[in-house]
Amino acid sequence: MSWWRRMTMTQARGAGREPVAGTGAMAAAAVREGRTLNAFTWLDPAWMPPSVGQGPLAGFGCAVKANICGAGWPNDCASAVLSHYRSPYGSTAVARLQAAGGLCLGLANMDEFGMGSSCEYSTYGPVQNPWREGFTAGGSSGGSAAAVAAGLAWFALGSDTGGSVRLPAHCCGIVGLKPTYGRVSRYGLIAFASSLDVIGILARSVDDAALVLSVLAGPDPRDATSLDAAFAVPDPGLPVRGLTLGVPRDLTDGLAEPAVREDFERTLAVARDLGLKVVDAPLPAAADAVQTYLVLAAAEAASNLARYDGSLYGGTTEPGAGSVGGTAFEQQVTATRTAGLGPEVKRRILLGTHVLAAGYRQRFYDRAQAHRKVLTARMQEVLGVVDALILPTAAEGAFRLGSRLDDPVAMYRTDQFTVPASLAGLPALTLPTGLDARGLPLSVQLVGPRLGEDLLIRLGRALEEALDFRSRKEAPWHRLP
Amino acid sequence: MAPVALSGLHPSVGLEIHVRLLTPTKLFCRCANRVGAESNTLVCPVCMGLPGSLPVLSAAAVACAARVALAAGARVNRISAFDRKHYFYPDLPRNYQITQYAHPLATGGELEWGGVGFTLERMHLEEDAARLLAGPRAGTVAVDLNRAGTPLLEIVTEPACAPGAGVRTWLQGLRRLLRWLEVSDGNLEDGSLRCDANVGFMADRNRTHPWRGPWTELKNLNSPGMIGRAVDHEVERLTALAQEGSTPVHETRSWDEKAGRTRLLRYKEKTRDYRYLPEPDLPPVVLAPSQLEELAAALPELPAAREERFQGQYGISAEAAHTLCRDRVLADYFEDVAGRLAGLPNTEGATLAANWILTEVAGRWNLRPVRPEPFAVPPQKLADLLQLLAAGKLARPAAKQVFAAMLADPGTPPTVLAQRLGLDGVAGKAELETWCHQALAAAPGAAASWRQGKAAALDHLVGRVMALSGGRADPARAREVLQGLLQAEDSN
Ligand SMILES: [Zn+2]
């Protein structure tokens, strides 16, 4: 067991360890173990800059999801259509990490363009769960989560559109933070569904996630939807006793597996022991959240992905192949998209095109928009009464790779507990709580009010300390050499 | 033109105008907004539509558009928003155009010039597409993204019963307003103003909606005159078709200037489904009442109002006022000079200034750019010259000579230039009489012709006096003296 796999950033610093030494060991391990886990799509041979910058992340290396751009990086979003693409510019998030001394080891595997819940829809093949081979690491930021859980990165950047940071954190037994929509600039995040996309953090501990957020958060003149809201790590001494957690039982009870329900009740008991009040907070509006999410996300995806037409990207296909009729340009578009986009991406584009089409728009897109408004208002209302919502991140632990590929509806349902916070643009924190009967991680998700990340961090810290999940001997960070 | 009765229908035309705005940057990025640069040099991740890039709205473009809307008396909406308009085309880097569809920047308003008025339906901001060029190989196209993302203001009018000549006048008025507000070059010829015209029939002169019967969309119209001719031709064509009893169909047509007729470009397909999506990357555009008040307060006096004021305040003709107000800098120059001549009795100074500027300045000043270079002769210098003229110290021909010298040497006072040219002071009576005697002596035939009643002979003699004096003689006085001498000889 190596210290750099086990320790959090806070612990390493407290123990007087040299972060960059740990990062070097990770870079070497990533080359050795990368193929087994399939967590990375690209390792940067030049990850070590001539001089390591100063700042809160000085020397700590991270993995960056393949849809977050760095200058000169092969940000292909795990899609064939971008297989020859190198981003000529970098994202605000990566620039801020690097300015804070952070190092980027490489790009993390993902579901193509972020569309998926298992990291199986990738041109690089599926990511393996570091807890057990043959199981999903979750999606779509599965590579990011696997890298952190396996100790191949101190932390990782992911993106969360409907649960894509929280679900992998859940599957891999680590912390996942989806900030408030707009709190972290999206400039340089390759869009899936722009009104839902958020850059999130996968970390070994709640404190580590807070530290990274403090570096990323804040307004960006390049992103008109970014919020003028910097983030400071809350003082560790702040008490949580007396705060109220709301449980949307109507959403979770009928759907979660028995093992998840048991683990969740245990977690609630721990919360009560910490002096937190636990009350019922029904959210009937969240029942149809997945449908609403699918419609809206697909509509925006169809729009965002229209640019991949063979002119600048994916132009390797001979115009004319696989297309019938139309102008030369139309033939090029058809050929490029037929060959360059994967089945799940095509499914969403077709769905998104359909729900915006004349004659269908009112039935689908407009209704989904209206429902999103109602749900957002209802969640804000509830969060005016309770301090945060608490619910399982998913209805079950990691599933076996391949078991959902023939059943897209079941795959979409994986996100049912995570999409409400996405639709409402609210911050959410996933932290590991226990293991299911198979020995795979389970977790809870705290959902806070808009810009309530500090509250989530305080609650998360208290639960994390009481649950002490990190010391589980079955965890990959203890098992791996 | 009286409306052509066509089973009670009136020919009418509605305009869709795209105005290229003169902002320093493109609409959604910081790239320079200018034409003429080498292909694909004014580009960045945003206007190339690269993955992960995001648009950020130019405040200058919003201000430009709001100025036009306010000048047209349109209602500027407190909240407007952008949408994505989807269609696959090589000139759209993202295969959608960011435009304002559901919530335009402004609605309503009316613009009227020379008796021709159009009610405005809406005005909105949108990005321009890239320019397509012939590709390196046959059958391919090349894309120049310099134009991609540059700001356009689209103005859509309600249909109105206007003949081609009226449409032309109106477009010229719009062009003047855009230049006056310094928001656009307004040139149809180079595409900084683009105008499509929808020609059809209305059931009732005063009811603008709905369109009745067939209509044609006229495209590729490159000058106001061309638009006027195309509209007239299309009305005739549609009327003839309807009278023949055949059913015209919806078409897109272009204007063939040489043949003097419209030509079919394509039949209108069934309405395209653009699947508009509220642009998630751009928050709504909010214009607070205080911002609008500020913008309105900063508007210059508008051309029509200024023309009217010029007539009242300066006693100049409607025609002179109109010509002076063709360009804002010209009108400013006139007012500046006239103001410096305010000491002259009545409106003599203004009249003098207007005449001089219309005959001597307007034609010499390159007013084509929206913000032209200042005129070579500063207003004070011209006022000085006109003072000399008004005081009788320089005759008009001499003043013209001095003015010509001033154009080359605007720093030197006109009195000094007049001295250098030997033109200082109008010649005295004695001198004038000498020249007149000399002129008569040199052209005895002219005197004879005059006596035979040929008035032109006197003009000839005045010309000789002017030549002898080297421009220092006052032609009006020379005429008087010559007439006196001839009559005296006559009575002898
Ligand atoms: Zn640009």
Image (cartoon, coloured by chain):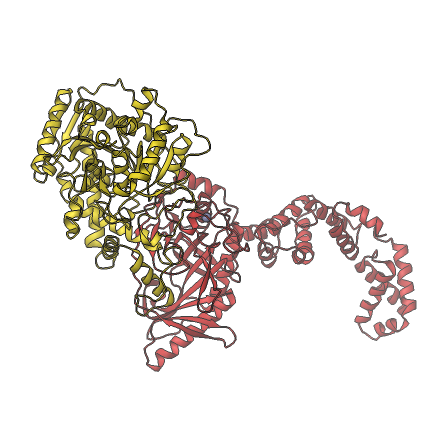
Residue closest to the far top:
A237
State the image coordinates of residue A244 (x, y, percent, origin top left). Answer: 16, 25
Q: Colour of chain A?
A: yellow
Q: Colour of chain B?
A: red
State the image coordinates of residue B57 (x, y, percent, origin top left). Answer: 41, 45
State the image coordinates of residue B74 (x, y, percent, origin top left). Answer: 40, 50
Along the viewing direction, whichever of B397 and A16 lies nearer the viewer: A16
Is residue B446 at all visible to an observer of this figure? yes
User: Which residue does the image show at 81% across and 74% down from the upper left?
Assistant: B453
The total number of labels drawn is 0
Query: Which image quadrant for residue A58?
Result: top left
User: Which residue does the image show at 53% across and 49% down from the upper left?
Assistant: B182
User: Which residue does the image show at 74% across and 46% down from the upper left?
Assistant: B384
Q: Is residue B236 above or below residue B311?
A: below
Quadrant assignment for the C terminus of chain A: top left
Q: Is residue B71 left or right of residue A285?
A: right
